[in-house]
Image: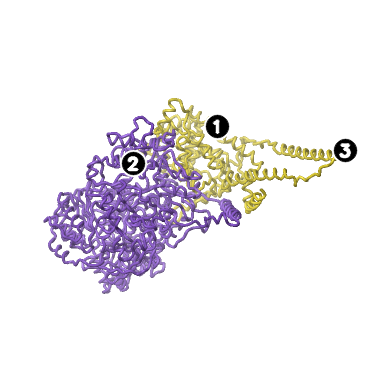
Chain colours: A yellow, B purple
Amino acid sequence: MCGKFGDCVVVLPLLCLKGTLIFNFIPVPESFKPMFQKITRSAFAFVIALLLSSISAYAAPDGKAIFQSNCASCHNPLKDATGPHLQGVDGRVPSKDWIYNWVHNSSAVIASGDKYANELYNKWGKTNMTPFPGLSKEEIDAVVTYVNSVKAPTPGGETPGATGEAPAENNGWLYTIITLALVVLMIILWRANAGLRRVASEKEGLPVEKEIPVYRNKVFIAVAAIVVFIAAGYWIVNGAINMGRQQNYQPQQPIFYSHKVHAGINQINCLYCHAGAEKSRQAMIPSPNICMNCHKQINEYTGEKEYPLYTAEGKKVDGTAEIHKLYEYAGWDPVKKEYKRKANGDIDAKPISWVKIHNLPDHVYFNHSQHVKVGQVQCQRCHGPIQDMDEVYQFAPLSMGWCINCHRQTQVQFANNNYYSIFEKYHQELQAGKRTGVTVEDIGGLECQRCHY
Amino acid sequence: MSQKQYWKGLDELNNTDAHKEVVENEFRESLPFDVSDSLLGSTAPRRDFLKYLGFSTAAAILAASCEMPVRRAIPYAIKPEDIVPGVPNYYASTFTDGGDYCAVIIKTRDGRPIKLEGNPKSSITKGGTSARVQASVLNLYDKARLRQPQADGKEASFDAIDRQIKEALTANARPAYILTSSILSPSTKEVIAQFLAKYPGSKHVVADPVSYSGMLMANEASYGKRALPSYHFEKAETIVSLGADFLGTWLSPIEFAKQYSSGRRISAQNLKMSKHYQVESVHSLTGANADHRATCRPSESGAVAVALYNAVVNGTVPSFGSKKLNEVITKAAADLKKGNGLVVSGSNDVSVQTVVNAINDKIGANGTTINWGVASNYKQGIDADMVALVEAMNAGQVGTLIIHGLNPVYEYHDSKKFVDGLAKVPVTVSTADRMDETAQKVKFVIPDHHFLENWGDAEPKTGFFSLQQPGIAPLFKTRAFQDNLMTWAGATGTYADFWKQYWMGKLGSQANFDQTLQEGILEPAAETISGAAFSGNVSDAIAKVSANKVATGMEVVVYQKVAIGHGGAWSNNPWLLEMPDPITKATWDNYAAVSPLRAKELHAELNGQNEVDAKKHVIKVKAGGVEMELPIVVVPGMHNDVVAVALGFGRDAKVGRAAASDATKGGKNAYPFTSFNGQTVMYTAPATVEETGKLYDIAITQTHHSYEGRPVVHEFTAEEFAKNPNALIEERFEEIGKFTALPWSEGKKEEGHKEENAGEMAEKMDEGFRENGTMFPNYDNEPSHQGIHWGMSFDLNSCIGCGACVVGCQAENNISVVGKEHVAKAHEMHWIRIDRYFSGMPEDPDSIQTVFQPMTCQHCDNAPCENVCPVSATNHSSEGLNQMAYNRCIGTKYCANNCPYKVRHFNWMDWNGADCFDDNLYEDGRRDDMNDDLTRMVLNPDVTVRSRGVMEKCSFCVQRLQDGKLNAKKAGRPLIDGEVKTACQQACPTDAITFGNYYDKESAIYKLRQKDQKERLFYVLEQIHTLPNVSYLAKVRNTDEIVAGNEKLDGMMNEHI
């Protein structure tokens, strides 16, 4: 037995060879826990809110939401931006049908020789508006209603809705102290009891057993050794499993880009920037020219009062300065309002070297489009409350167990996608009521070569 | 069945002791420590154990606990509109190499070309590719490519070079010569014409490394045009090839392989197939596929053509010494006379080709199987022109020499004379992409773009165009050959502009241009076949041929390997170097191929150095004043008096690390064996051979992965098959019939259920065997087994063994190159290999028949490998895939031991730097450039690069399957049959591979197995109930007897050697 412990002693210092290693093994500190709970809670709340909002969206088109996700990148209700301001648009244009036609396919309207359309086209630098053939007339009406309802902000008027995030209560430390105090009390009482018994025995002249110190008590050594062995084993195994995982990794990025400001407050659709999520294995980090679609106009951060920006360490961030960092990369001259160009006429842009947060090992194949487009999985399901993050952190562990769990529980879009018509037996079972749904696992979603090849 | 004897090599046939040992020890090296009793009995085994344990734990901890690096994600600065990161783009383009042609589609990922596929829209190559086309993408990332133009061996700028050359051209004291290989590009020809017009007196000389002058000149004499016709092997019912390797290397092998295989698709419903006669002196890929094959001396090939002519015209019975040869000529002549015949010859002798033309004329081939209305432009070089140029150079009559696409210092038959002449030319320019033998001797080297970096076009056949668009911007400071000429001729603009104008002019509108560029092909609606009037002088040709002395003693034949071809950049392509030669299965070297009988005489027979041992006897070959020491590789089916040496080896060190040759590696240059006969270059010569007593290592894969004589190939003659198409079903029933029903089931007969109708029997047999052939449950009944079940089928009749699939798979699946030393240890990693089986008597080359069998993971539904994996790293998917999870594998190799098909490959070394340990990469000096940052750009990002210590094998290209399924899901529709193709299937030039979803009753694979080809269907080692998902279709040979089934021959065989 001693031999075995000897081995342990050999191995453990090896484990500690690297300082950083020890850190890997320490479980998440207690003080972080509230944050996680909060995140989980808010993620849950968000998902529910999202579900609710999508339900309400079916009832009546939400003009604001449609505007934010489709129009806001080029239009402002009140100010001219890439395109003209939209308030009062219904009054300016020839007819309501004209708006529908324009939105669905503006170049066709221009090509038809429409006078107003051509004037507009020439005035706005002969750039076509992106067509939105998918928007229904009701939705366009809702957008018009919304832009007309927007009021100009009165300077210094509204006070920000203080979120008042009171730190969650935690009594853990109190219980710990009480437990420790009780343990100490127990030891004291036990020692006192033993001492009194010995005194009593001496007094009565009974033979006194020679007391063996605890550290030489064989039972104690055995029990302690087993406890240490189990604890160490648990600790090592857990540590080893978690090696290379980076949950909560929140690096500093070259530009303080706040998802909260963009996706949260301004409600920009995730797919506007991460267009690859529906098409490719990579969601795609947008190139600076995508940012410039909006930031040609938006050259300052105006939310200082309502939503002041802080880094994770609590340092104040100047939003406008960050936008100007973007201009550096994009090759935009904010004074002349035009791109700086190289000798050969190309825009003098530099790529931004972001720090990659979500890292999968090389032997894992993950495809965004499979999940976003086919599986209809919400971004937040894996990325957490991204719309609340100023600086992005890794929300999920991205461990295999985490993937597998989701594949076990998630139902595939079985009825809506004709691809799955080949699974005849399941369709029969569904029809016969023998089955309520088909999970990813049921169609082989746990097999190795779905992700490893 | 059991009496049929096939053998992979002579060692297997003779079952030598060394062979037995190899078969028993699948993994050939001994373990790195002593596994005897002494380990356990030693004084301190526990301490040793603890030492190993402690060390490996510490090592693992150190490796795993390295701090997580900060990884960067860098998006485009300005994203191009048509690129979505992670989604491949495809561009139609054109592969040309000298006159070799293939219409291709380039797959680019994130701006890098990573794979080439055939363009199915081309009516010439019809989507087929060759090993070289598949490997050409690796040449793009070749580390030996020049990165700068050079002047006098030093880096120089384009401007400086242009100035000097322009000065020289303008001074024009002596004329300028442009020396090129055959040019298929019409726009390039235009550029050359403009250059020649600008500098009067300058000339364009065309030469080919391997010449077809004999044919061109014979055709000029016979038909009045110096051109090659279009051949139609698919229309031919009788094909006679006199030494032409038209499936491997001759003229346009991809095109011919497509045509040839379409004329040989046989089924019980359609019994028609062409009959192929081959008379040759070496054992070529084409010869291996022939129905009737006979050998002759190389110097006899003319006489054979004459004999065939006489047999066709007068019915004269030939009188060669070889009975088989006489028989083949007589039979061939009789078949040719039936019509729809085609005779081709690989000879470069004008008279021989004239006789062949006369035969084709007599049998009415012109206008049926030979189209004179559409010329083939593949080869245009005339040897005499080249010889005249070298004379002019030596006479000091050449002012400027611009060499493009040729490497005469290496390839010219009289290299010394060329080098001498070169020294007398004041300005010499080469456009070589590397410092090859010629580039080292010229003044200026202006490296040309790789074809994947350049705009261009091709006219492989008159009126058939193919556009070439780049897949990537030039990687280095290179410049197109055409741009050179345009600059020096003082033209404005670039070749790309010129090219666009040229095609806009031809196509009329931008829309037409865009569409043509997108499709890559511009062809007439249909090819009309027309003949031509033969006006050659046959009697003169026959007289000349007969005057040629037939040599006595040995003769040397210089031939092209299917993989390496004439040399060029291919010599430095590790994928091609490691691709086993279809016939010899040798890699990385060239050698002297001789027949078993001759080898015995040279004391290189089995008892001495057998095929199992990599060490080969070296002989000295002397021919035409040239001496060369070459190792012997014994090739059954070679003529006994022939020693054959392949081209493309023996390269200079600057050609690249893989190509570099010295006494210990890289082979020898065989071009010096060629000679000029006053008219054309000859590729054969009388020779003498002598023993040297030296030994040289050759890495041959044919003895790896033995089936230990178990029958794995089925073969019938066309006659047998027509008589009883159900013979194979019955044969299979003999083997497995008794297991198709449970012993206690009702109506069970002793031998199982036997149905009257063979088709029904086949179906019931398969089902019954799956269900009842095992004591374990049938996992096909699991609820998750529905929807998709992948299946593949190889048609042994279509497979010609060319190896395009091997290299295609390598490119798609990031398969490692292991180098010669490790190939010799059976460590090669190819996921698909082509097993080559001989049958017949080794000492009689005419008796040899060859069968090719592609072998890859069979994805068994009852896989032996899965059951023995201790960590379940290999297991079965609900779609019938035998999955391999690399990151789970701990490398016990139990699976490979238990695999009856021997298709699993273990990563013995860190081939690719994929391990997390630094400095662990395997290096051998030749394959090392595979791991350069540049070369690694060829890797497919969708496939894991495997690290040391894990097992790997064919995955049915699961990344393609997943991608195909995803696309179908995104479109909301079921998978369409044929939508997903595996890499091997797509690369195959003969459509020998069928792949699809077996559960889809409309799929090609289901129909093939259950309806169209059920008579020829078989599974390899079916009786052991592995339930493979890969099936095979039996080979049907249009011949009189299958040698392997012949008891008489078997008896004789056992007496041999």
Along the line of sight, the residue nearer the viewer: B1022 or A55: B1022
Q: Chain of mark 2?
A: B
**Amino acid type, mark 2:** Glu
Name the spot of residue B781 as percent of width and height, x first.
42, 34
Along the line of sight, the residue nearer the viewer: B700 or B596: B596
Q: Chain of mark 1?
A: A
Q: Quadrant of residue B15?
A: bottom left
The residue labelled by disc 3 is A204
The residue labelled by disc 2 is B735
Residue appearing at x 21%, y 68% in the figure: B678
Q: Are marks 1 and 2 in contact (CB under 8 Å)?
A: no
Furthest-left residue in this view: B314
User: Can residue A106 be seen by looking at this rendering?
Assistant: no
**Amino acid type, mark 1:** Ala
Q: CA distance from mark 3 to mark 1?
A: 77 Å
- Name the disc covering residue A49, or none: 1
**Amino acid type, mark 3:** Glu
Q: Secondary structure at mark 1?
A: helix
Q: Chain of mark 3?
A: A
Name the spot of residue B303 as percent of width and height, x first.
18, 61
Left or right of B627 in this view: A85: right
Q: Secondary structure at mark 3?
A: helix
